[in-house]
Image: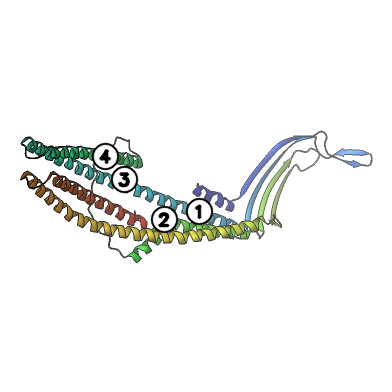
Amino acid sequence: MAAEAVGVATSGYLPRVDLQAGYAAQQAPQAVKFTAESIPTQQADYAFANLSIYQTLYDFGRTRARREQAVMASEAAQQAYRGEEQDVFLQVVRAYYGILAGQKYLATADDEVKQMTHHQKVAQDMYEQGVVTRNDLLQAQVKLANSKQKRLSAANTLENSWLYLNFLTGQVAGFRSELEEPEQHTETADLHMMMEIALRKRPEIEAIKKTIRADEAAIREYRSSYYPELYAKLAMDYLENNRVQEQTILSATVGFKINLFDGLATTSRKRQAVKIRSREEERLRNLEANVRLELETALNDLKVAEERISVSEMAIRQSEENLRINNDRYVEKVGTATDVIDAQTLLTQTRNDYFRSVFDYQVAAARVKRAVGEL
């Protein structure tokens, strides 16, 4: 729509061609009086036609400003569209890594169910041997049921994540694909340099800059309305009249026209355009500040997520060893069932923390690219 507005504004450089034709039926023809006698000067019924070509010669930059305004608005719309694309892409990134994380959560839940099933079997055997009380067996059964519920919840979350990704990418609800997990990498660019890139590449910032230029062109357009317009006109007028010699008249006109008073509408429009430009300039300042905040937040989240990954990797190894020790202690009758269950819960939590850290890292990396307009 903005591109079509450029065509409308450009039409001011081209001539305007108008054709008018019709047939008039009068009650009586017009006549002139000579003493007591009236002499008709036209036919009572007649056909007429008019063909005119109107060309603006000079309007003190009004058409040029109007076209520049339309061009800037079109380019602003293009940049705004690019910004919308990047927002949608960021949503896809979140959904994509959400599925990867969901698959990991489901695998962790499956492993917990497997571990709790094994623990219940051990508790069942030891109870039948009279080594432990029924409380240990009941505790294992309850924990197994709880683990199965968490697995169902993880599977449901994963399924919903697939539905959301398919919605964003235009796939059918049942579509499934193999998702690849990209390698982890660290963003090391300087904040000041990345901010310069953001101010240069962020489409929303460029869109507002284009809008401001369009507002400046609108101010020039309204200002030029105080000046006259020079024009040329070619015309052919036909009027059916058998009482005159020339029924077709050809004419050429060069002239100017100017509005002397329009109720201060032009003045009000110019003031309005100035205030609109001031508003867009304020929006630009606010957007630049928001982009800086967005970039700093994303970089900070990226750094923290990387550190969380390192900590979680070590915690997983420690939790696995802790579970192994507590399982052995329980079998050797020197540990309790509660220790085994707590160790398994801790392992599940550390694994989920690790997968969540990886997910947050990848999303933060995408947010950094979005902040600088390179997503």
Q: Are marks 3 and 1 in contact (CB under 8 Å)?
A: no
Q: Amino acid at mark 2?
A: Pro
Question: Mark 3 = which residue?
Answer: 95
Mark 2, Cα crowd under 10 Å, few <14 / some 14-19 / many 20+, is: many
Q: Position of residue 189 (x, y in %)?
A: 30, 63
Question: Mark 2 = which residue?
Answer: 203
**In the image, which is nearer the foreground, mark 4 or mark 3?**
4
Q: Position of residue 271 (x, y in %)?
A: 61, 59
Question: Mark 4 = which residue?
Answer: 153
Q: Position of residue 201 (x, y in %)?
A: 39, 59
Decide which of tag 3 and tag 1 comes sooner along the chain: 1
Q: Is residue 185 visible?
A: no
Q: CA distance from mark 3 to mark 1?
A: 33 Å
Question: Mark 1 = which residue?
Answer: 73
In this rendered view, identify the residue nearer to me: 354 or 135: 135
Mark 1, Cα crowd under 10 Å, few <14 / some 14-19 / many 20+, is: many
Q: CA distance from mark 4 to mark 1?
A: 49 Å
